[in-house]
Image (cartoon, grey):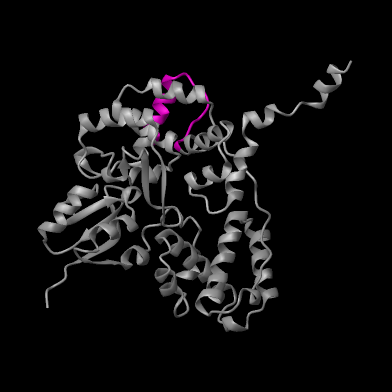
Amino acid sequence: MAHVPQITLTNAINNQEQVVKIVFEFNRKIIEKLKMVTSAKWSAKMGCWYILKNDFRLNNFYESFKDLAYINYSGLRASKSIVTEQSKAKRSKRNLNVKLPPGYLEKLEQKRYSQNTIDVYSSYFKDFISHFNGRDLTEIKKVDINQHILGLIRKHKISASQQNQRINAIKFYYEKVLGLSKEFYQIERPRKERVLPTVISEEEVMAILLALSNIKHKTIVATIYSAGLRRNELINLRKQDIDFDKKIIFIRGAKGKKDRISILSEATATVMKVYLKKYNPNYWMFEGPERKQYSATSIGKILNNAVKKAGIEKKVTPHMLRHSFATHLLEQGVDIRYIQTLLGHESSKTTDIYTHVSKKSLAKIKSPLDQILMNK
């Protein structure tokens, strides 16, 4: 039986930066793949390869290396020295020795929840177990759970978002692990905060693009805006995901681990062909130094510099380009159902929010003051 190589992933600190260590016995194929599809670097001090934590995507890594080796990523979960972005869920010290009930962690992994979600759910459910201090979880009543959540709101002032996450972590155990019906456990949810997306005008989009002289930078910004991409979706684009003949962009493993297709504008296609001829990327559509995957931080810097150069005083983020894409399509009269599909929204309610920021929708409404003055 052929020996299957193993890659072990663990959290670590290198030069005061959070990193993911990639440990394996010498294997030329794994090394070549690391160089080709990741931003991994060799550390003589640690004696292994590593990737900056902010640039590491477990799903992408797993898909790239699953055919080459067995990937052990339990160390990403177990390390207590590193706290991930989502883990700002403030784990209490009393939880370090709390054990999750059998099946909880396994079910999260079977359902392919992201590592961030696994960390957050695990932390919040340990809080829940600690609060009830050894009580049989199956005997805890709805009223007890509601009082637990209410206590967190009153004492710790948890946000509506955290309240929802804690509820989901609890519901996951009763409904997914124990297999009980949803009727068994219903907690009153917080009122959803309705925050309108911030958008920029078509003129501001053009000003930003004109301010970009570097063809790679121009292509990156044009692609995000013209296809309504999230920043990570752009970073994960491969050369083969662009179909110039059909004028489409194939987006793999987007939010919710769902693939989708968006449009490739003619203007973006023109700029993109010039970029491809000049840079000739190897695997990823947009590569950073040493042909590694482009970083999210770099995209933010590109946009910030272009915004300043264009003389735009407001703060513009990559996600605002996506919001602007949706709003501008709506203003052109595109059916909101098509926009929903292009954005990858599961519910039309998510897409409906753009009707509240459309200038043309508001332009049809006259202020009562104008109506009064017009009738005078």
Q: Position of residue 298 (x, y in %)?
A: 34, 36
Q: Position of residue 33 (x, y in %)?
A: 18, 53
Q: Quadrant of residue 148?
A: bottom right
Read off the magenta span. 300-318
Residue at x-position 65% and y-position 48%: 193
The extreme top residue here reads 376
Q: Position of residue 278 (x, y in %)?
A: 21, 29
Q: Can residue 135 be seen from the camera position used here?
A: no
Q: Quadrant of residue 138?
A: bottom right
Is 79 positioned to the left or the right of 288 in the image?
right
Is 303 positioned to the left or the right of 36 in the image?
right
Is 306 positioned to the left or the right of 94 in the image?
left
Residue at x-position 41% and y-position 36%: 224
Is 187 positioned to the left or the right of 336 in the image?
right
Quadrant of the image for the C terminus?
Answer: top right
Q: Position of residue 357 (x, y in %)?
A: 62, 35
Q: Is residue 17 magenta?
A: no
Q: Is residue 307 magenta?
A: yes
Residue at x-position 43% and y-position 34%: 226
Residue at x-position 48% and y-position 31%: 316
Along the viewing direction, whichever of 375 and 175 lies nearer the viewer: 375
Please determine whether, in this image, residue 170 is positioned above or below residue 195.
Answer: below
Q: Can residue 370 be seen from the camera position used here?
A: yes
The extreme front residue here reads 245
Along the viewing direction, whichever of 193 and 99 lies nearer the viewer: 193
Please determine whether, in this image, residue 113 is positioned above or below residue 159.
Answer: below
Along the viewing direction, whichever of 252 and 7 lies nearer the viewer: 252
